[in-house]
Image (spheres, helix red, strand yellow):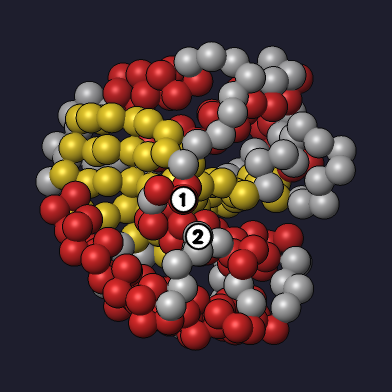
Amino acid sequence: MNYEIYCDESCQDVFSSKKSTCQYMFIGGLWLPAEKRAVFKHELCEIRKKHNAFSEIKWNKVSPSGIKFYLDIVKYFFDKGDDLQFRCIVVEKDKVNLVKYHDSDAELSFYKFYYQLLHHWILDFNTYSIFLDMKTSRARNRLKTLHQCLKQANLSSEIKILQALPSHESIFIQVTDLLLGAVNAKFNGQIKSTAKQEVIKAIETRLRHKIMATSKGHPKFNIFRIDLAGQR
């Protein structure tokens, strides 16, 4: 089966900036069957038309004026069952030893964690096209190296492409941003508005539990908190 994965990240500067207020860093992805991409895109655009909401979908833009739109996006995600699956990894800043394990390179550690997000949900005998939110990398060929590592580690599946896209060009990266933002807000204790609280409540109501770490194999809404006990 052919799958597409649309990825985003949050608080990625926790290892490189002393000004970061986050304790955790997050990388997330939205998994969907490639054959349903066009239908899903059309249906999400219809939700936009319904609410006259054509700006980029982002967690930071959740506000009282647009709350019905964002709640409809959450409802749409859950109504699609296993055809839309979300997975993210949670990395605790204080447990990452950049010097010992990542050559004092915060960017290198970031892409290593990207590998952890993707590798464990790539199944044998499937084909994957992976799209990351476009960002500037200090070192060249980071995406090429990540692509090669995933291919070598998943010989029974095909990693067809791995490329960066501007988030404003992909509604699926934008949906990832929304879901990932809710996880970030819960873990980092940064729920600053009643509108964001409503979105989190809507997610937790559909989950039937709080937004929290799950087992690695948990379907639909997977939050994997990486154990870095050996990397302090």
Q: Position of residue 55 (x, y in %)?
A: 50, 64
Residue 77 visible in the current orientation:
yes
Could you classify mark 1 by the number of other residues whose Cα lies within 10 Å: few (under 14), some (14-19), or many (20 or more)? some
Circle 2: element type: loop
Does 188 sit above or below residue 24?
Answer: below
Left or right: residue 61 versus residue 175 is: right
Does 228 sit above or below residue 29?
Answer: above
**What's the residue type where badge 2 is placed?**
Glu
Disc 1 to disc 2, how far (Cα)?
A: 6 Å
Q: State how many labels appear.
A: 2
Of residues 45 and 15, the one drawn nearer to the viewer in this rendering: 45
The disc label shown at residue 168, or none: 1
Does 75 sit above or below residue 6?
Answer: below
Proximity of marks 1 and 2: CB atoms separated by less than 8 Å: yes
Circle 1: element type: helix
Q: Which picture quadrant has residue 162?
A: top left
Q: Position of residue 94 (x, y in %)?
A: 78, 41
Q: Residue at x 33, y 38 (%)?
A: 130
Query: Residue at label 2?
Result: 56
Q: Residue at x 66, y 41 (%)?
A: 12
> Which of the two labelled residues, at mark 1 and mark 2, occupies the earlier sequence position?
2
Q: Residue at x 82, y 52 (%)?
A: 21
**What's the residue type where badge 1 is placed?**
His
Of residues 153 and 181, the one drawn nearer to the viewer in this rendering: 181
Could you classify mark 2 by the number of other residues whose Cα lies within 10 Å: few (under 14), some (14-19), or many (20 or more)? some
Q: Position of residue 105 (x, y in %)?
A: 69, 20
Q: Which picture quadrant has residue 40?
A: bottom left
Residue 216 visible in the current orientation:
no
Q: Position of residue 58 (x, y in %)?
A: 55, 61
